[in-house]
Amino acid sequence: MTDEPPLLRPYTLTRGRTRPTGPEFELMTIIRAVPGAPLGGLTPEELRIVRICQSPTSVADLASDVGLSLNVVRILLSGLRDRNVISARAQATVAQLPEERILREVIQGLRAL
C-alpha cells in the first residue's frame, strides 16, 4: 500500500461543473486571495488554492503547485471568484509598462539622491 491520497475524479472536485463561470482565466492571470474572506464551506482543494494565493500567483503556476489539471483549477477559481474569496487580474503587458526613457529618468533621479 502507498502513502498517496486516494485519486478523486475531476467531476467530484468541481462538484459536477464542467466550465468556469465568468471571464476566462488565462494562463498568466494573476490570482490573489482576498484578505479576510470567509473560508467556511470550502473544499480541501479550494483551501489549498487560497493558501497558495496569499501571495500573487499565476494560474499556470497554481495548477502546477496543486497538481490538478488546468481546466479543474480554472473551474475551482471561478467558484472562489464568485464567492469573493480570490481576485484575478491580467498580467501587465508591455504596452502597460512605462517607457524605457521614463524608467531611466527615475533611476537617474534615485541615483542623484
Image (cartoon, grey):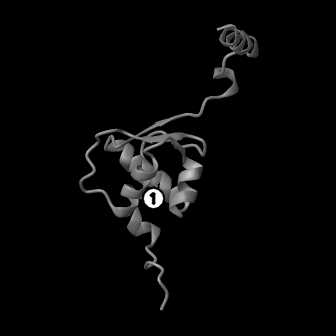
Q: Is residue 101 left or right of residue 10?
A: right
Residue type indicated by callout 1 = Thr
Q: Residue furthest front?
A: 113
Q: Report x, y in % for residue 30.
A: 53, 39
Label count reads 1
**To which quarter of the image does residue 6 belong?**
bottom left
Name the residue located 61 percent from the left edge and 29 percent from the top edge. 92
Name the residue located 46 percent from the left edge and 77 percent from the top edge. 7
Name the residue located 48 percent from the left edge and 80 percent from the top edge. 4
**To which quarter of the image does residue 82 belong?**
top left
Q: Is residue 84 left or right of residue 56?
A: left
Closest to the observer, 15 or 64: 64
**To which quarter of the image does residue 58 belong?**
top right
Q: Report x, y in % for residue 32.
A: 45, 40
Q: Report x, y in % for residue 29.
A: 55, 40
Closest to the observer, 112 or 103: 112
Is label 1 in a helix, a strand or a loop?
Answer: loop
Classify the position of the C terminus by image quarter. top right
Q: Is residue 59 visible?
A: yes
Q: Is residue 20 left or right of residue 38?
A: right
Q: Residue furthest bottom?
A: 1
Q: Taking 99 as reference, is 44 above or below it?
A: below
Q: Give the residue at mark 1.
A: 18
Name the residue located 67 percent from the left edge and 17 percent from the top edge. 98
